[in-house]
Amino acid sequence: MDLIEETREFVTGLLAGEPSTHDISHIERVEKLCLRIREKEGGDLQVLQLAALLHDAGIVREHKEGGNHAVYSAGIAREFLAVRGLEESVVEHVASCILTHRFSRGIQAETIEAMILQDADRLDALGAVGIFRSLVSMGALRALKSTIGTVKETSMNAYTEDPFEGFCDYMERKPFRIMERLNTVTAKEIAEQRMRIMHLYLDELKVELQ
C-alpha cells in the first residue's frame, strides 16, 4: 500500500463515528478540490494530498477536550509521517499547511500548498454541500453540549434558542465572508457558483419564515 492510501486508511479509522461534518467524506471532498485547484495553480502533489487527508485528524480530540483541532492534527501528521520515513522537511511542510487551514483562526497561508488547502476546505463550506454540512454540524454541536457539555467557542451561533436565527447568523459570519478570504483564482471561480446557490436558499428561507 502506498503512503497516500495508507494515510487515507489511517484517517478513516480515526474519524470513524465522527459526529459532525469533519468525517472522511469531507476529507475526500477537500482532497478532490485540492487536486482540481492544483491543476491550474500548481503545487507539490504529495504534500497537498497528505495535508488534505490529515488536516482534520484531530477533530475528535477537539470535540472531547476543546482546543484547536488544527494543532492536534498537525501533531498527528508529524508522528504518523515521521515513522514512515518521510523527509523532515516534507513532514514539516505538511504540518504547516494543516496548522493554517482553519477559517476561524484567520492565519495567512505562506505556500501555494497551504493556500490551496485553505481554499479547498473553505469551498466545502459553500454551495449545496455547505448548507447540508452547516445544518448537520449545528445539530451535532447542540447534541455534544447536551450530552457531554462540550461547547465550541468559535461556533456559538449553533447554540441559539432559535436554530433558524443561529443558522442565518452562521451564514453571515462564515460562508458569505469566504469569497474575500480565498487565495487562488481557481477557487474564486468555483466559489461564485456555490455562493449563488447559498444566496438563493437563504432568500427563500427568509420568505418562508415570514
Image (spheres, grey):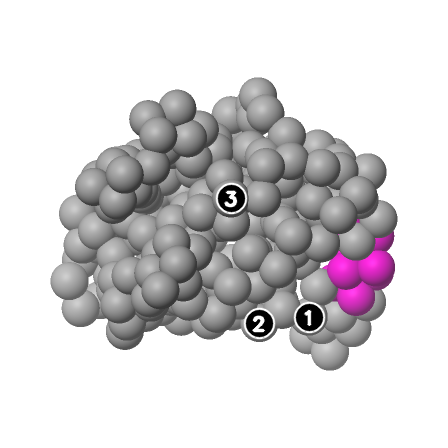
Q: Position of residue 21 (x, y in %)?
A: 44, 65
Q: Position of residue 4 (x, y in %)?
A: 43, 56
Q: Position of residue 123 (x, y in %)?
A: 65, 52
Judge whether 94 appears above or below 53 on screen.
above
Secondary structure beneath disc 3? helix
Say which amino acid is labelled 3: Gln
Residue marked by disc 1:
128
Q: Which residue is nearer to you in this view: 76 or 149?
A: 76
Disc number placed over residue 193 in the picture, else none: none
Which residues, given as a range, are shown in magenta? 191-198
Distance Cα–Cα, label 1 vs label 3: 29 Å
Residue 64 in which image quadrant = bottom left
Disc number placed over residue 46 in the picture, else none: 3
Callouts 2 and 1 close, C-beta under 8 Å: yes
> In this rendering, would 168 be left or right of 94?
right
Say which amino acid is labelled 2: Phe
Say which amino acid is labelled 1: Ala
Quadrant location of the C terminus in the rendered image:
bottom right
Q: Position of residue 42 (x, y in %)?
A: 71, 37
Secondary structure beneath disc 1? helix
Disc number placed over residue 132 in the picture, else none: 2
Judge whether 105 appears above or below 168 on screen.
above
Instruction: Give the residue drawn at x 35%, y 64%.
Output: 1
Callouts 3 and 2 close, C-beta under 8 Å: no
Callouts 1 and 3 close, C-beta under 8 Å: no
Q: Which residue is nearer to you in this view: 72 or 63?
A: 72
Secondary structure beneath disc 2? helix
Judge whether 3 appears above or below 141 on screen.
above
Residue 46 in view here: yes
Q: Is residue 148 magenta?
A: no
Instruction: Give the residue drawn at x 75%, y 70%.
Output: 201
Distance Cα–Cα, label 3 vs label 2: 30 Å
